[in-house]
Image (cartoon, grey):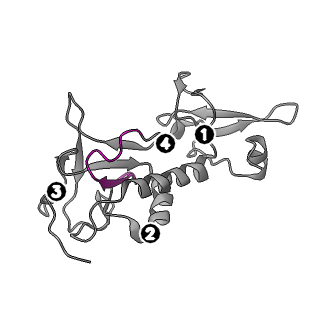
Amino acid sequence: MMTRTLPWTPPPAVDVEALPVGRWWDAVRAPSNIGERALKTLGDETGAVIQDMYGTLYWLIAVGSATSWHLRGVRVLTELADERTYLGVPPASWTTGPKSHWRVPLGPNRYLTHPWRLREALAEADRAEYGPMPEGRQLCYHCQLPTSEPIPVDVEARGNGVGKTIYACPTHAPLYPTGKRPRTLTSAAAAEHEGRR
């Protein structure tokens, strides 16, 4: 593989620097549970990946290469017409945590991730973590507002033996009263309930 220089300069080894997305690259943000699965799926096909202090992962992709992705909790960060968006970029030498660091180190031969490979890996991780996307919008148990990114957080038992799935929006899923992270509904009972068998 040919070595090439980066079209931008990472921050010096002093601190994280807020750099504008949409100038040299866009970024895709994924929560840790989805991001970790996607990272394993991509393997050597991943470009550089930033991990922040909360475990959230950020992939760098070509500007304008991902505009209409619809995955639960995943966000494409790009320049908007009326506002700037910034991403905290750590120095290239920061390759271990717990602060923001390069989970997959940045380099001339490891820079951008192919957007459609990344989308496929994130979609696979979304299905594995949360099951199939339900039809239509669902009410969030916490805010009682409809969400087009419903995350299953529990199954409420009913007298007839069929449970009702309780959903939350990505913001409120971590707040589910059990104090646990949103549990995955991949058990046999949940799979049968969701029609995945």
> For the residue labelled by badge 2, is the local secondary structure a helix, a strand or a loop?
helix
* Amino acid found under the numbered disc labelled 3: Asp
Distance of label 4 from label 1 (alpha carbons):
9 Å
Q: Is residue 52 visible?
A: no
For the residue labelled by badge 4, is the local secondary structure a helix, a strand or a loop? loop
Q: Residue at x 36, y 40 (%)?
A: 67
Discs 3/2, front: 2
Write the start and end of the magenta stretch as one range: 52-68
Residue 118 shown in magenta: no
Say which label, 1 or 3, has the lower sequence index.
3
For residue 43, the mark is: 2
Mark nearer the N terminus (4 vs 3): 3
| Residue 20 percent location from the top left of the image | 18, 44
Few, some or many residues within 10 Å of mark 4 (<14, 14–19, 20+): some
Type of amino acid at the residue the image marks with label 1: Met
Please tell me which of labels 2 and 4 falls first in the chain. 2
The secondary element bearing badge 1 is classed as loop
Q: CA distance from mark 1 to mark 2?
A: 25 Å
Identity, as a three-letter code, of the amino acid under mark 4 = Leu
Residue on which the image places disc 3: 15
Are the residues tagged 1 and 2 within 8 Å (C-beta)?
no
* Residue that badge 4 annotates: 71
Q: Are marks 4 and 3 in contact (CB under 8 Å)?
A: no
Say which residue label 1 marks. Answer: 133
* Residue found at the very far bottom of the displayed protein: 1
The residue under the point 53% across, 38% down is: 173
Q: Disc 4 versus disc 3: distance between alpha carbons?
A: 31 Å
Q: Secondary structure at mark 3?
A: loop
Residue 127 visible in the snapshot: yes
